[in-house]
Image (cartoon, rainbow, N blue to C red):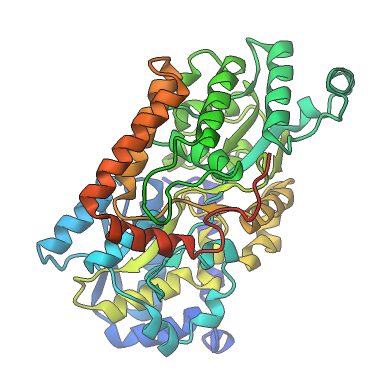
Amino acid sequence: MLSRLVTGFLAGAALMVGVSQAALAEDAAAIAENAAKQFAGKTVTIVKIPGPMAMEVTQFSGPEFEKRTGVKVALVEVPLAELFSKIMLEFRAGNTTYDVLDVQASKIPDLARSGAIVPLDDWMTKYAYWDDYKDVGAAWRDAWGRYGGKQYGFVDDGDVFLLFYRTDLFGDAANQAAFKEKHGYDLAPPKTYKQFEEVTQFFTDKYKPSIYGAGNPRQRGTMFYWFEEEFRMKGGKWFDAETMKATVNSDIGVAVLSRMIAENKNMPPGIETWGVIESMNAWLAGQLAMITWWPGLGRWSEGYGTDVEAMSWVPKSQIIGKVGYAVVPGGHPQLAAGNLLTVSGNSQQQELAYLYAQWLNSATISAERVKLPFSFRDPFRVSQFKSESFRALWPAAGAYLDAMENSSKTGLIDLTIVQVDTYNSLLDQGLEKAFSGASDAQSALDEVAANWDALTEEIGADEQREAYQSWLAAPNAYPAQPSE
């Protein structure tokens, strides 16, 4: 059962999207909705990962789309670890079950090159969607979903790392005085990695074992995001653009990994095995002074929406009203993961699939979807950052949205090339060896580079170069200038 909070929210959202057709005559949602009515009686199928994200379809957008168009929405749930392979298997088998695919941004090259997804440009023109889509934050809009000069997916999630920090600890007068005396500058959210180290050590030295300065994940599966972020901010490049030889083991890479290894001593014991859940739990329990994480942690820190049954896995926050939000050290946060709406290459009703995707992604409908406690959709449009209704969700929601918008403007997109998951997995293996002490930073990254070179040779250097050049063409693949 949904809590009274969410039941009330859904009722309000349904009322909002149920406004008169005349009022929405020029709205992108209404354009898609009116066109979809010709398909009344049909069923469009969307593929999503199980859990709360799937609830967004069953509890909100699916029933509302059917009410407004007569088109039913069916849901297929596939675990995240299996999603890409399942999509590819279904495509190669010629199966036509899937219509709309909800995929991560880094998968676009593989999906587009295979034909598993189709370009959306012509439909965007036909259904006047380009202007509405300009509302999407530029860092995501100009990079995610585009490949080979074509639009293959709609940015549908504002993933970007934020720095969360404890305002009560940072604002404590004794802490401020002691830190200023020791380091000669004011205690504040760190702007550089050197400051991050100093702030982390300060809080750890004072409060351990009850509180540690920071606790960023170090477990295989996601740790590469944190390395990728700092590596590029410090001036690192993944490949030689001409030869496609890996350069992850450059002096910059070794220095970054060495710093991360040294940093572990000021984080909680066992940090080397912490994943995103362990870090989230420690933060919500009040055991960390800082953490770098996805935006969803901001709303959970304030207890927003966590009384929904589907969100019962999120621990009750012990730090409500004590959380601040800032841009990560170095100023160029990772736009980590992200979700895009795409149309299946095997769909037998691609135009209907497109119309459902446009309707979901439109400024009108997405504004409500990002406020759903269980949607796992972070704000991704300029209008959403300015939304008064979102800013009213908790006292510091405005500061949260401001930090998100500021972070998105300088964010760096994930490496997006052919078989990127395998490259990331090989990087994670090397990082894991270094964090465990099984290998030093240089040896670990040398092994990563050798494994990357072998994979590039297997794929074909020319083919991978084409994908890498497409990624490089995005304005936020690498920062314009290195930072500290």
Left or right of 274 on screen, residue 387: right
Residue at 68% x, 63% y is 387
Residue at 28% x, 82% y is 40
Give the answer, above or below, for where 123 lies relative to 60. Answer: below
Pick the quarter of the image with the N terminus: top left
Residue at 68% x, 23% y is 200
Residue at 82% x, 29% y is 187
Give the answer, above or below, for where 102 lies relative to 254. Answer: below
Give the answer, above or below, for where 274 lies relative to 56. Answer: above
Rendering coords of residue 238 (x, y %): 45, 46
Rendering coords of residue 483 (x, y %): 67, 44
Q: In the image shown, does 113 or 46 lie closer to the viewer?
A: 113
Left or right of 126 on screen, residue 13: right
- Based on the displayed image, in which of its 4 quarters is residue 232 positioned? top right
Give the answer, above or below, for where 442 lies relative to 230. Answer: above
> How many marks on residues?
0
Q: In the image shown, does 209 or 302 lie closer to the viewer?
A: 209
Q: In the image shown, does 335 or 231 lie closer to the viewer?
A: 231
- Looking at this rendering, what residue extends furthest in the front direction? 243
- Evaluate whether residue 47 shows in this view: no
Pick the quarter of the image with the C terminus: top right
- Evaluate whether residue 396 shows in this view: yes
- Looking at this rendering, what residue extends furthest in the left direction? 93
Rendering coords of residue 113 (x, y %): 26, 66
Left or right of 460 on screen, residue 327: right
- Based on the displayed image, in which of its 4 quarters is residue 171 positioned? top right
